[in-house]
Image: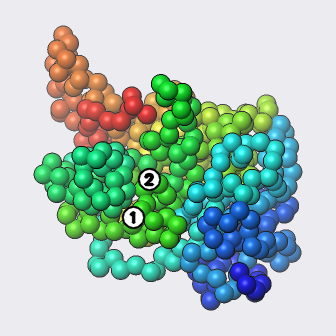
Amino acid sequence: MTEAPQISAGRPQPLGSTVVDGGVNFSVFSEHATRVDLLLFDKCDDPQPSRTIHLHPDKHRSFHFWHCHVAGIGAGQVYAYRMDGPRDTKRTGARFDHRKVLLDPYARANINSRWNRTLAIGLQDNVETCMRSLVVDLDDYDWEGDQPLRTPMEDTVIYELHVRGLTASPTSRAAAPGTFSAVVEKIPHLKRLGVTAVELLPVFDFDETHVLRTGPDGTPLHNYWGYDPYGFFAPHTGYCTSPHLNTHIAEFRDMVKALHRAGIEVILDVVFNHTSEGNEFGPTISFRGQANEAYYHLWPQDRTHYMDFTGCGNAVNANHPFVAKFIIESLEYWVTEHHIDGFRFDLASELSRGDQGYEMAVPPVLWAIELSKVLAETKIIAEPWDGGGLYQVGRFPGKRWAQWNGPFRDDVRRFVRGDAGVVGDLAKRLGGSEDLFGPQKELPTNSVNFVTCHDGFT
């Protein structure tokens, strides 16, 4: 950056980074921050920012949103944040730490080439090893008339697909194994299977270095499955062929467009129930350093500690007003900007928990999803349980939600195994599981019947 850019107040909405008015508008949420700095990097791999812009609260803050407009920059700009404020983990849960560099939660693309998870946990400054966000121009793409397919639920046959696993083996002979572009090469195979939709295991950006186990030789394993996201608006960097060239969006859209041309819908397996930041001993990547007390369920007796209904160290406080907004805007973004046909919600019952972790009769975020105009023709599918013992098969809040039918899986597998006395149970499942969905006056199409899935491997 050869000369200082012109900085103006900007606008609080939309959140994230937006190419507009000869520059970029930046906006981020933090209710309790007392200082927010915007870091601009000239290149993805630069160890230090070329410019740090201090957002003055009198000029660059509107209620809970910090914002500015930077003239003369555009798509491809690399950026991140620092925030400071109270650190009162026990009483309020606030965890501000100006030494930690933070991703934009609304970033449309990220880059992780210098990332070191360990250095995001300790007391040291981690600017040289932080992840960074990228500005994206969403209008720079030709969809060629593509639209979501709207296949009726009763005609839908779903194929669960892991982007990397589909083509990682050399036997796949893919040009770029394990990427979005390689999925396109396998469309003829998917057509031969007769499926009408692929359900992509998590493609939100996630930390591949977040592992809890080592291999037989003692080396750390990589996070293969992706069930620990940090980028809820960003395609996973590791599934792109050229992330340094800011190709995330185009590569993902090319895949969706090709699948639609083949008559195959795209459903995303989405993880809104927890994030990659883990428990109180985990790294500060984004949410924890911006609004920890809003994003997460914290124990009321000592808000240093995280409630965990997911088995992953934390649980997202989905019914906090801002977090609900965040989730809705993420879903609507994937539909409007990426033409996604549906979503399967991992551990969806966690999203029905209120601030203290109790089950809510009318969870605001689930009803907001059900009532969204943008999502009105989008398939919404719940895994209707969570890791904290909440089980809602047949009684998941809302009428539009289809639900993974766990009893169908169990009864069919028992029958195939040859267990005695299960013919009646099998008949109920093949007849539409009226015992589960009838009491709530739901339809057979509210049941997603499956026999096997990724569970047990993740």
Residue 251 or 18: which is nearer the viewer? 251
Which scheme is used to colour this image of the protein? rainbow
Name the residue: 75% across, 53% down.
126
Residue that appears at 24% across and 46% down: 171
Residue 16 sits in quarter: bottom right
Quick check: 149 above or below 354?
below
Percent coordinates x, y for residue 74 in the rendering? 60, 81
- Which corner quadrant holds the C terminus? top left
- Kind of residue at disc 2: Val
Measured Cα–Cα span from mark 2 to mark 1: 10 Å
Q: Residue 70 versus residue 196: which sits nearer the camera? A: 70
Residue 173 position (above or below residue 426): below
Question: What amino acid is at disc 1?
Answer: Phe
Q: Which residue lies furthest to the front in this view?
A: 217
Task: Locate the N terminus and report the quarter of the image it occupies.
Answer: bottom right
> For the point 21% across and 25% down, which residue is it?
412
Residue 14 seen from this side: no
Picture coordinates of residue 326 (x, y %)? 58, 58
Residue 381 is left or right of residue 385, and the answer is: left
Residue at image coords 82%, 71%: 54
Q: Where is residue 414 in the image (x, y as percent from the top left)?
A: 23, 19
2 or 1: tag closer to the N-terminus: 2
Q: Which mark is residue 203?
A: 2
Q: In this view, does 93 lie to the left or right of 271?
A: right
**Is residue 170 visible from the viewing direction of this image?**
yes
Note whether 1 is above or below 387 in the view shown: below
Mark 2 touches mark 1? (CB < 8 Å): yes
Q: Mark 1 points at which residue?
A: 252
Q: What element carries label 1?
A: helix
